Image (cartoon, grey):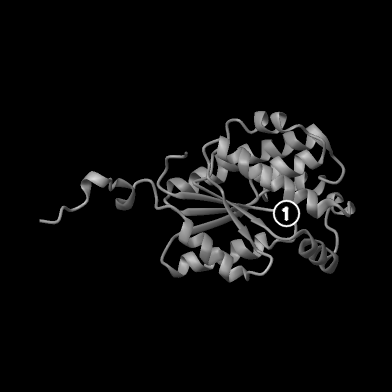
Amino acid sequence: MTRHPGVFVTVDGPSAVGKSTTVGELGRLLRERGIAVHTTTEPTTSDLGQFTRANANRIHGRALACLVAANRYEHIDNELHTWLKAGDTVICDRYLASSLVLQQLDGVPEPFIRAVNADILLPDLAVILTARPKAIAKRLAERGKRHRFHDDPAGPTREVELYTEAAQTLRTMGIQPLLIDSTEATPMDVAARIADAIPPPAGSVENRICPNDRPVNR
């Protein structure tokens, strides 16, 4: 796990499960609780991030996986470390779990994806939103296709399956993901569940208490 004054939270999941809305709602909720929050996204708004986003339908496979990973390392160095060292709770819309899914949909083997992401910053809380495939397909139809992965009618089912596998991969890396089904839940409900699951900062009093430190009844 990471060791810094802030807390790093990532939110991943299939298209149309409400990630961006949830991240916005979560940021609002945490600020109401008096917590300093920085929200961000991947690909980022840097030149490299914008290039990656603009060309994701044209660049495929390992080349795209490397671009995404390069932007992630840039993101870590230029943004994530800065805000986490300042003690903020950083919430990132899409991170490692999205790579494990979207790059596999693009034909890239998981070992390659893990290799190019071997030295990234690991989240303190990795949230994976999911929903029933039929609900995802309906939402996609209502909002319209946004990238080439939406061309496959079986895409929603396959994404849900791969995110379940990604959750298991995260567990092997020492990360216990929080899986939330957003099919019937509102973004406010989902945000509240995430907020309650966010661990305290590494240097907080809560993290320094161990069982032997607890008061003894006399």
Residue 78, percent across and down?
A: 56, 42
Q: Which residue is at a point 60% across and 61% down the rendered structure image?
A: 23
Residue 214 location (% of width, % of height): 22, 51
Answer above or below: position of 29 versus 2: below
Taking the spot 57% from the left edge, 35% from the top edge, the residue there is 172
SS assignment at label 1: loop
Q: How many labels does the image show?
A: 1
Residue under numbered circle 1: 14
Q: What residue type is labelled 1?
A: Pro
Circle 1 crowding by C-alpha within 10 Å: few under 14, some 14–19, many from 20: many
Percent x, y of residue 111: 70, 29
Identified at 66% across, 32% down, the residue is: 114
Residue 121 quadrant: top right
* Residue at the limit of the structure toward the front, as seen here: 218
Quadrant assignment for the C terminus = bottom left
Q: Residue at x 67, y 30 (%)?
A: 116
List the single residue furthest toward the left: 218
User: Looking at the picture, how far across and down is residue 103, in whole percent?
Assistant: 76, 40
27 or 14, nearer to the observer? 14
Instruction: Examine the rendering and report whether any part of residue 51 can be seen.
Output: yes
Q: Is residue 47 visible?
A: no
Looking at the rendering, which quadrant does residue 36 occupy? Answer: bottom left
